[in-house]
Amino acid sequence: MLQLVRWGLASYAMLGAIFGAAFSVQAQNYPDRPIRLIVAFVPGGATDTLARQLSNDLGDALGQPIVIENKPGANGYIAWNFVASSDPDGYTLLLAENALGISQALYKKTQSTFDPVKQYDAIAGLASSPSVLVVSNNVPVNNVAELVALAKSTPQKMNFASAGIGSVAHLSFEVFRVGAGFDAVHVPYKGGGQAINDVIAGHVPMAMTSIQVARGLVEGGRIKGLAVTSKKRAAVLPNVPTLPEAGVKTDDVALGFWFGIFGPAGIPEPVKAKLDKAVQTVLNNPAVRERLAKLAIEPEYLPAPALKTKLQNEIVNWTKFIDTHHIKAE
């Protein structure tokens, strides 16, 4: 009997070694097929824009195509859970923005079991970009002070659009609203593209949106840009002041967008190393940097540990703001 047990243990050990060796070979050969890059919102928003700007370059650096898949819905959670439950083989990745941390802070008291810090491996930080406070052309204001005065004097609260509950656009506007001292009604959409279309049409008077979306619309006179969330004016919209220039104080939270690549927890180290190297190669490419600069996207490479820390800090900072100002997930 003892001999049989020993034989069984030896067999399990042998199988483990075989599977381990095969897994190691797969990791060393990575990638040998297309890689899916998941975006949690509809096409047209900030995250989708960056994904499409970098996908071909990342594909060239890795030697395999990068296929972008938009999986909108449930304020990002459909895509986020999809990636978290995928095989940790490096072939399903997430291009996320700080909404990943914001939503975790906003929904922390619900029954959701999703935890990006535990369920994801951080791969690399990519970039940052400001948001723009915009209003419809039918709103009779031309600057932030006039907008705030109008919002305070309107008997019925004004509406603001966003890419969804817990999105960067949602919480960035909340920070502006709190700093300016007025109330407003949140109108969430399934993505930034849908939200801004209704601002253009005049159905919703105001919103925070990515500068990539806002720039052409402001320059073309289809909407009005009143302020940018960056610390200094954006080179692509030099006539639009910053929020501090407009006299609005903001809480100690990061406004605008930061972007990073994540994958399901358990990705082999050789795979993560190849992905990290590809990101560095792309972000160091002068042609890529020039292309991103024209969209007011600042390349900001972060190694995996720094990206994970950034996500953790984002959750802490937004939790404090949300709790202090009683922001609700509605």
Image (cartoon, helix red, strand yellow):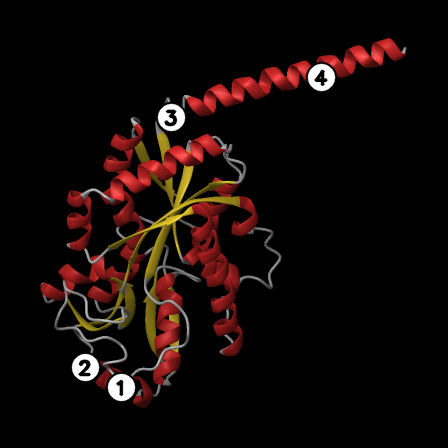
Q: Residue at x 48, y 73 (%)?
A: 321
Q: Is residue 75 above or below residue 148?
A: above
Q: CA distance from mark 3 to mark 4?
A: 29 Å
The residue depicted at 55 percent of the width and 45 percent of the height is 119
Residue depicted at x 32% and y 34%: 67
Q: Amino acid at mark 4?
A: Tyr
The tag on residue 12 is 4
Amino acid type for the residue under numbered disc 2: Val
Q: Which residue is mark 2?
A: 141
Q: Residues within 10 Å of mark 4 (few under 14, many from 20)?
A: few
Find numbered disc 2 in the image and state the secondary structure of the residue it sits on.
Answer: loop
Q: Secondary structure at mark 1?
A: helix
Q: Earlier in the sequence, mark 1 or mark 3?
A: 3
Q: Are marks 2 and 1 in contact (CB under 8 Å)?
A: yes
Q: CA distance from mark 2 to mark 3?
A: 53 Å
Q: Which residue is identified by label 3?
A: 31
